[in-house]
Image (cartoon, rainbow, N blue to C red):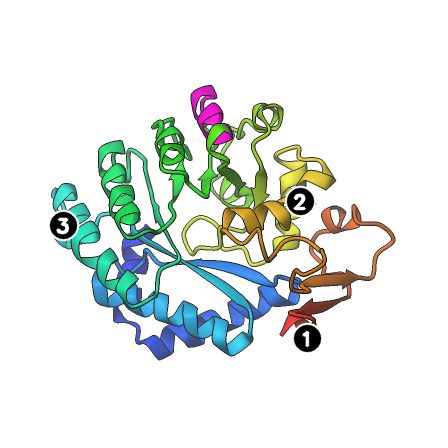
Amino acid sequence: GGIVSTVRATREASEEELLAAAAPRLEQLLADGVTAIEIKSGYGLELAAERRQLRVARALGERYGVTVRTTFLGAHALPPEFAGRADDYIAQVCDHMLPALADEGLVDAVDAFCERIGFTLAQTERVFQAAERLGLPVKLHAEQLSDMDGAALAARYGALSCDHVEHLSPRGIAAMRDAGSVAVLLPGAYYALRDTHLPPVEALREAGVPLAVSTDHNPGTSPALSLLLMLNMACTLFRLTVAEALAGVTVHAARALGLQATHGRIATGVPANFVLWQLQEPAELAYWFGQRPACRVVRQGRIVEGGR
């Protein structure tokens, strides 16, 4: 079960099969008004399978005309063939997988899972150093299950974002503030895992750390495909204000992807990506759940039907 079963299925799937499986999921997100998306690898844990995932991500962007940012998450879990040899696997990630995929233009950012059931702080830093050598920005699955001090490490490398952050410490918050890193809140995973340890939203708010909100769509801990539902959960579970939640799926989400110059805001000279909703007031986007208010999506200045 868990990541291992998904890794097995991903390794067995062809590029065409992965594309066919991913397309309807992307279509659901686009129908919610999404105009830019991050797609991570991390379910292949070997070069060929990681390459297929990232190639499919690029293909989805081309097919649907949507902005896709690819994130290499080779340091997601330890594959079975490297059992008991985590350092050797990290060497494989840093010395072979990442350079090859970056050389093919398949990687926009690099992520890692720093956790007791994932990789150590030292192993995570090796991944960040490899990304830095290649001129790639980093981000981190940080402090989801425990405080590993990963956010402070990520901040030292100028991380775009730290994701989950339920167990984020004051030291981590200060480091993220100073680095300008975004805290990405993932209420879908929090809900699915029946977590009870809330992220320190008030402390992040007081420190001025930007808050983004996302689905964390994955088969194991967040099989969620509605960004609108995440808006509701961010407000009801994490106590974000409606304004914070809306900023979290627009301007701060764009910043977490390194797209702040071109996405997440309406301004002169910025590509026209926005959604027109049939609502009385913006707060309704976070109020309703289990339904999709009628909308019209404008992407790159063009009205697209059904988000597509």
Q: Looking at the image, which residue sits at the far top? A: 170
Can the viewer see residue 4 in this picture?
A: yes
174 drawn magenta:
yes
Q: Residue at x 71, y 56 (%)?
A: 266
**Magenta: predominant secondary structure element?**
helix
Residue at x-position 69% and y-position 56%? 290
Q: Which mark is residue 82?
A: 3
Judging by the rendered image, the residue that carries numbered circle 2 is 247
Residues at discs 2 and 3 in contact (Cβ within 8 Å): no
Residue contact between numbered discs 1 and 2, judged by CB atoms under 8 Å: no
Whether residue 38 is situated above or below residue 284 in the rendered picture: below
| Residue 183 magenta-highlighted | no
Of labels 1 and 3, the one closer to you: 1
Query: Helix, strand, or loop for circle 1?
Result: strand
The residues bearing labels 1 and 3 have C-alpha atoms spaced at a distance of 46 Å
Q: Secondary structure at mark 3?
A: helix
